[in-house]
Amino acid sequence: HIGKIAPAKGSNDTTQLGKPAEILAMAREAGLLAIEHVEIIDPLTIPDQHAYVEKFFQLRQRHGVSMAEAEYRMKQRNTLAAMLLRDGKVDGLVVGISRTYPEAIRPSLEVIRTQPGKRAAGTYILAFKQDIKLLADCTVNVSPTAEELADIAMERGMRTLLADGVRKAAEGLTTLEE
């Protein structure tokens, strides 16, 4: 599956992480017109791979990550994407397309972490032809209290502008059928 990263500030570009030949083949099969305008980064051959391995190792070594584990993890799309976000190379991530939820969110929690006083909360994005729905925290916080639910709702409510960005990204990947 295609791993997608939101564009960097001041840009309308999208970056995909994965094997370029596979991404191009899937995009062509799906009839995506804008694939030529997408930057594709292969985590196995990214030019700055060693630097990202070293940064990840420094960040996670006290949590039991060895250099060999750091090298392995930087070849994983979700972990590399989280590092790109941490370094400001991209503005956001869309993950979880081909991974279980814990596998999808773990790299972000390990690399980006939460802000002091804030909690992590997942968001499912449901894209329909005429609408986009965001379902906040259906996965991360088990049995939250009413106060915690209110906090999560307020935090996620402040981020609903994301839906507009997702809608614009989806419009940029118009299919041949439309």
Image (cartoon, helix red, strand yellow):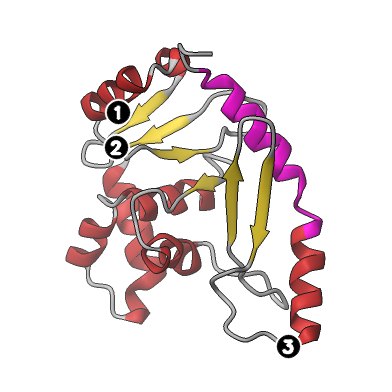
Sequence-wise, the earlier of marks 2 and 1 is 2
Where is residue 139 shown, x and y percent of the image? Answer: 54, 71
Mark 2 vs mark 1: in front: 1
Of all residues shown, which one is farthest toward the left? 68
Residue receiving disc 3: 145
Q: Nearer the viewer, residue 3 or 73?
A: 3
Q: In what quadrant of the picture does the C terminus appear?
A: top right
Residue receiving disc 1: 23
Left or right side of 151 for 167 = left
Q: In this view, does 176 lie above or below 113?
A: above
Residue at 76% over, 43% down: 161
Asked if the stretch drawn in magenta spans residue 172, the answer is yes
Look at the image and give the residue range highlighted in magenta.
157-174
Q: Do the residues labelled 2 and 1 touch (CB within 8 Å)?
A: yes
Identify residue type, mark 3: Thr
Q: Is the magenta stretch mostly helix, strand or loop?
A: helix
Circle 1 Cα neighbour tier, 10 Å, few/some/many (<14 / 14–19 / ≥20): some
Q: In this view, does 174 lie above or below 159?
A: above
Residue at 28% over, 52% down: 76
Residue receiving disc 2: 18
Q: Distance between the residues labelled 1 and 3?
A: 42 Å
Residue at 82% over, 66% down: 154
